[in-house]
Each structure stands twice: as structure tokens, then as C-alpha cells.
Image (cartoon, helix red, strand yellow):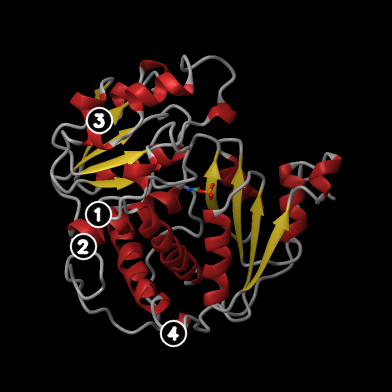
């Protein structure tokens, strides 16, 4: 146990103090949006994680606020429910001194039939600098990135990608294990419907980890054998010798048929408990992106075991990671404002 009180944490390098002047900051991302992990380079991911480390230090201090995004506007537009992602983007924006607006989709004109693009272009006309969007359709964030002239951040699109979740997972792993090279990570459960799994597979393979998918055949994508991962249908075999067990939520709301016999059966074969964990490497870490279905994909005794579960640490890393993402994207923003946008053909007016 180290001075931070967290077991197994490596000594971290001393990071430079946070800069508050965007003009002085080096670019980290090559693009003006964060739409997915696919397409990012190792250097971009490493740059974001290094920057996030500095925000972890800031967030652990008494004063958590800097003026980096003073005068900038961030809009959170969530078409699906969220606890962790929405609140951490809100906190991240506020700690960087941006004006943050959470758009409540339920009470917006979406309930009157307004489309995603019309809603987003309406908000875009209010001149935000960044729009964080979660939507039930894969590709929604990318679509908006072509239509809007602010930075778009994908906070989860259908079963496609959830890039900031993979980045915060990576930060958690790197802090605990020092790196990724040679680590064996088992991603277990409902891979089929999971954007978290897709983003993590891209990131972990790129950074040199070995990835196993452990799931019933019905909960694996048909093309999973082309992902460059090892596939297991049996938890005992799939968890043997792994360094990290990443559990996934069973996404019952995305299932329109019988993917599993019952949640009781599912827990028996695929729910993580201490018994199934015995075959993993001693000290293997347990992760879960949340929200958890206790007694379905994970036993409470494992989820709440502070010797092995880093689930709350993932949440903490989420704020720092999202601050790093907003910081990195802000480096590409014009400092003198932008011209009024002329609506392109085919874009609906509110
Ligand atoms: N992990 C995650 O995306 O959680 P929320 O749905 O609460 O944002």
C-alpha cells in the first residue's frame, strides 16, 4: 500500500503543473472531434492519458478549478440516460471554468418530434464550443460532426463506441499496472451490445495488451473472430491467468429477443463471483463501466471488494479523463471566435 492508500499503485512520474493558457499548450489530438478510439494513434492516446494524470492531481487537491476554458461553452446533449458520463462531463467542464449546459432531452422539442440534426443545429446556432452527445444510434456523433461547426465528443453512440470510457479504463489500468504491454484483459458478458467493449478492444490491442472476449455465443458479434482477440465461451477457461477482468452490463433494453435463458441462468454461468475469479492471476483487478446489474453479471461481494475492484476508481478517473479530452480539443479552437454559420443545403431549420 502506498501513501495514497490505494494498494498496488505504481509510483507515478511527477507531472508538470497544469497550464492555464491554451495558447501555450501543445496539440495532442489531430482531429477537432473525439468520435471513437478507432482512428486515434498510440501517441494521441498516450498524450491524453498523460494529460489526464495531471488532472487527477488537480482533482485531488482542495482547489479543483482552473480557468482554461473560461468564456467557452459546453453543451451536454444526452438522448439516453446516464449517471457517470453526463455528470463527469459537467464537472469536467465546470472545473475548467467553461459555461456548461445540460440539455434535458425529455423536456426538449425532441418530445414533439424534432430530429437529432434539427435539435443539434439549433443548439449549434447558440455558438457552443463543444457538444457532448450520447445517442442510441451508432454513428450519431459522427453525423453531427459533419453538420456542426463546434467540437463534437461522442459520449456513447448505440453499440458503436464510447471513447472516453475506454480512455478512463486505460488510465485506471495504467495507474495500477504501469502500462499495457503483455497484460491479458478478459472482457466478459454482453459484448454484442457493448460500445464500451468495442472502444476498449481498439485501445487495448493498440497499446499492446492481449484481449479475450468471454461470452455466450448469442452475446458475441458475428465477426468477433476478426477483432484480433481470443474468444471463450466458458468463464473458467477465459479467466485463467488474466490480469484484468472487465465485466460488461447485460443490456436488456437493447435485446428484442431471448439472448439468454434467464438472468438467474446467466449469473450461474457468466456472473463474476469469487469462485470464478480463483483461476485469474493472483491480484487480478475487476472493472465494470457501470451501471452494474448486481447478481446478474457481477456478485456484490466482488463489486464491493476493495482489494480487487477498481470500479469507484474508474469513476474518479472519468472526471480527469474528460477534463483532458476537453483540454485537448480546446487547443484546436480559434481564439478569436468563429464566423456565423450559414446553413448547408438539406439541414433543417427549427
Ligand atoms: N459507463 C457509463 O457510460 O455510465 P453511464 O451510462 O452512467 O454514463
Residue in the image at 36% along x and 30% along y: 271
User: Element at badge 3?
Assistant: loop
- Tell whether label 2 touches label 3 (CB within 8 Å): no
Assess whether mark 2 and mark 4 are in contact (beta carbons under 8 angstroms).
no
Q: Which residue is mark 2?
A: 7
Question: Residue tagged by mark 3?
Answer: 229
Q: Nearer the viewer, mark 3 or mark 4?
A: 4
Residue 221 visible (yes or no): no
Residue drawn at x 44%, y 49% as measured from the top left: 163
Q: Which residue is mark 1?
A: 307
102 vs 281: above or below: below
Q: CA distance from mark 3 to mark 2?
A: 29 Å
Q: Are marks 2 and 1 in contact (CB under 8 Å)?
A: yes
* Observer-nearest of 29 and 317: 317
Chain-order first, disc 4 or disc 2? 2
User: Are dots 3 and 4 in contact, CB under 8 Å?
Assistant: no
In this figure, which residue is indicated by the disc labeled 4?
62
Query: Mark 3 or 1 closer to N-term?
Result: 3
Task: Say if disc 2 is inside 8 Å of ligand 1.
Answer: no
- Marked residue nearer the N-terminal end (2 or 1): 2
Q: Secondary structure at mark 1?
A: loop
10 Å crowding of disc 2: few (<14), some (14-19), many (20+): few
Callout 2 secondary element: loop
Q: Nearer the viewer, mark 4 or mark 2?
A: 2
Q: Earlier in the sequence, mark 3 or mark 4?
A: 4
Left or right, 286 with reference to 134: left
Amino acid at each position: 500500500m502506498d501513501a495514497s492508500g490505494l494498494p498496488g499503485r505504481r509510483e507515478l512520474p511527477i507531472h508538470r503543473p497544469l497550464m492555464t493558457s491554451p495558447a501555450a499548450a501543445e496539440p495532442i489530438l489531430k482531429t477537432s472531434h473525439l468520435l471513437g478510439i478507432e482512428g486515434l494513434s498510440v501517441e494521441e492516446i498516450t498524450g491524453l492519458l498523460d494529460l489526464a494524470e495531471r488532472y487527477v492531481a488537480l482533482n485531488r487537491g482542495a482547489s479543483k478549478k482552473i480557468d482554461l476554458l473560461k468564456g467557452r461553452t459546453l453543451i451536454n446533449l444526452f438522448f439516453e440516460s446516464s449517471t457517470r458520463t453526463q455528470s463527469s462531463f459537467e464537472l469536467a467542464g465546470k472545473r475548467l471554468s467553461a459555461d456548461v449546459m445540460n440539455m434535458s432531452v425529455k423536456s426538449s422539442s425532441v418530445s414533439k418530434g424534432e430530429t437529432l440534426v434539427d435539435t443539434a443545429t439549433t443548439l449549434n446556432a447558440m455558438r457552443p464550443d463543444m457538444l457532448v452527445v450520447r445517442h442510441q444510434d451508432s454513428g450519431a456523433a459522427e453525423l453531427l460532426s459533419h453538420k456542426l461547426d463546434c467540437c463534437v465528443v461522442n459520449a456513447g453512440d448505440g453499440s458503436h463506441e464510447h471513447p472516453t470510457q475506454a480512455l478512463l479504463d486505460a488510465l485506471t489500468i495504467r495507474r495500477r499496472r504501469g502500462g499495457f504491454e503483455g497484460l491479458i484483459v478478459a472482457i466478459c458478458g454482453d459484448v454484442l451490445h457493448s460500445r464500451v467493449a468495442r472502444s476498449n478492444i481498439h485501445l487495448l490491442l493498440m497499446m499492446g495488451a492481449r484481449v479475450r472476449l468471454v461470452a455466450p455465443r448469442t452475446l458475441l458479434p458475428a465477426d468477433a473472430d476478426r477483432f484480433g482477440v481470443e474468444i471463450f465461451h466458458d468463464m473458467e477457461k477465459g479467466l485463467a491467468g488474466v490480469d484484468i477482468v472487465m465485466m460488461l452490463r447485460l443490456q436488456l433494453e437493447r435485446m428484442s429477443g431471448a439472448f439468454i435463458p434467464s438472468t438467474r441462468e446467466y449469473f450461474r454461468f457468466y456472473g463474476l463471483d469469487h469462485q470464478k475469479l480463483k483461476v485469474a492471476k493472483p491480484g487480478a483487478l475487476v472493472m465494470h463501466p457501470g451501471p452494474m446489474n448486481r447478481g446478474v453479471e457481477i456478485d456484490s461481494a466482488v463489486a464491493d471488494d476493495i482489494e480487487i475492484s477498481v470500479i469507484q476508481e474508474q469513476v474518479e478517473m472519468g472526471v480527469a479523463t474528460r477534463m483532458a479530452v476537453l483540454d485537448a480539443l480546446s487547443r484546436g479552437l480559434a481564439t478569436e471566435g468563429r464566423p456565423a454559420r450559414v446553413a448547408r443545403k438539406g439541414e433543417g431549420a427549427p
